[in-house]
Image (cartoon, rainbow, N blue to C red):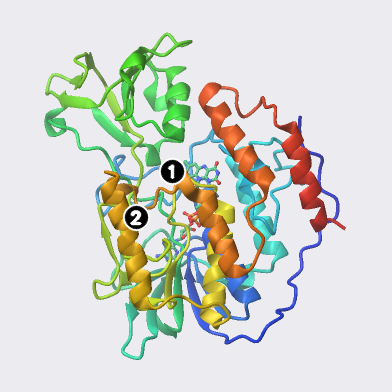
Amino acid sequence: IVPAPVPTVRFSNPPTMYPIASKNVAVIGAGAAGLIAAHELRQEGHKVVVFERENQVGGIWVYNPATESDSLGVDPTRNLIHSSLYASLRTNLPREVMGFRSYPFLYKRGSHRDPRRFPGHREVWEYLKDFAVDFKLCGLVRFGTEVWHVGLMENGKWKVTSRKREGNAYNDRNQEKLDEVYDAVVVCNGHYTEPRPAEIPGVEGWPGKQIHSHNYRDPEPFRDQVVVLIGSAASADDISREIAKVSKEVHIASRSVQNGIIGKLAGYDNIYHHSMIESTQGDGSVAFQEGSVVYADIILHCTGYKYHFPFLETDGIVTVDDNRVGPLYKHIFPPALAPWLSFVGLPWKVVPFPLFEFQSKWIAGTLSGRLSLPSPKEMMADIQAFYSSMEASGTPKRYTHNIAGYQFEYDDWLAAQCGCLPTEEWRKQMYVETSMRKRSQPETYRDQWEDEHLVRQAEADFSQYFS
Ligand code: FAD
């Protein structure tokens, strides 16, 4: 079943209805987060410049077949590739759930378009390009321009230093730079580019190859190999099944594996579940905590990424500690610098685009003075209470921005701050149904579903955008 193509769509910028104080705002990044931030900021009446080091909008959704010179992604001098997409990637959310609320992710006719409900990555890129064109955002973006440094000035403003990209070279420290002053900075640089490989005892002397999923594009390099894949998140699931088609064996090592499922994966001849890696040896062996040993050729780390803000200098006010970016009020504002510094898109295990949209609305409204924040002291107290509750429940710091358990409460809290409608019920239900299907039928959940009634509700909701 494919959704019907879209008729004429009207997307306009409705006039701003309230008195506002317009600020000069720098947005770093023109991925999904930076685009919606730019849109909401401009809607609120701010002057916006978006810095984007690539030559196009879309961020991670601009597929790049090239890989980095260090396949594990730890060498700071490696050639940097922003996108982590692999060639066969299809979305893990249905398009109805995934799209911005103000700009539904609908199927449009066209030679590059993918009508599927869980489309391939190119369709998401096309959607983001459409969004940028329909809302006339491209004129706000300085393409091929990297933000090199962001620093706080004595008068409370921000000095933003940028430089034009020349060829592929970002590492030339002598390249000419431009300094500008902004009232506020919104950081939207993404967090799927700086790999966070697993620490493996003995791996320095292990003779095989190591790759992080950031540099995984297709299964060919794994042909006839024995592969140990570390991880259990969505991309680990997809990639293990894809490489199992060509490799000799795939051994999945994961922290969260339950004893009952250690051993061969049902329905596959060559995929095995293990507990975490205990050690690796110079003879090529990999020992797992449950006691089994394999001789492997490649270790593939599907272990996630680090938050990384190499350009940001806040005199120690904002730090990254074991992947906790903090202190941040509601994952957005450092109390001491609010609302003049903010972050869009830090939460993970969420429906990202609508969440970015709520965050951006809130940031835009607080910058204009239309919405108000609690005092810095109150915001700090809220953050401390949050950190204490994490500690009390034994949740590691690195899960600070994993808001899977309360993402819709979070979105709806933001919606209430902004005075807009909470997340649609159909979207919540469709998300839950998809998550269940993903677990029960991981190979087929993208092509077989039973939530057609929710699709109809979504379409009825979207019809307000069609003329
Ligand atoms: P990005 O898209 O990474 O954009 C950041 C932008 O900032 C980039 O364009 C980059 O060039 C620019 N930038 C960075 N540093 C600088 C600098 N110093 N100066 C100037 N520009 C800079 N989400 C879904 O909704 N559905 C999915 O199915 C889905 N699948 C995913 C699969 C994978 C493998 C991954 C890694 C993520 C997936 N996501 C998915 C999540 C996805 O990351 C988000 O949907 C979203 O696109 C992130 O947008 P962003 O703008 O925060 O970051």
The residue at the point 31 percent across, 44 percent down is 69
Query: 462 or 396: which is nearer to us?
Result: 396
Q: Amino acid at mark 2?
A: Tyr
Inspect this view and state whether residue 183 appears: yes
| Residue 43 location (% of width, % of height) | 65, 74
Q: Does ligand 1 reach within 8 Å of label 2's beta carbon? A: no
Residue 362 picture location, percent across and down:
54, 69
**Which mark is in front, 1 or 2?**
2
Pick the front one: 198 or 44: 44
Label 1, ligand 1: CB separation under 8 Å? no
Mark carried by residue 452: none
Is residue 142 found left or right of 66 in the rendered image?
Answer: right
Residue at x-position 40% and y-position 53%: 191
Q: Give the residue drawn at x 31%, y 89%.
A: 154
Q: Is residue 261 left or right of residue 30?
A: left
* Residue 356 visible here: no
Q: Which mark is drawn over residue 307?
A: 2
Q: Residue furthest bottom?
A: 155
Q: Earlier in the sequence, mark 1 or mark 2?
A: 1
* Quarter of the view holding residue 176: bottom left
What kind of residue is marked 1?
Answer: Ala
- In the picture, the quarter occupied by the N terminus is top right
Q: CA distance from mark 1 to mark 2?
A: 22 Å
Residue marked by disc 1:
66
Residue extending farthest right: 467
User: What x and y, as percent, mark residue 363?
Assistant: 52, 71
| Total marks placed | 2
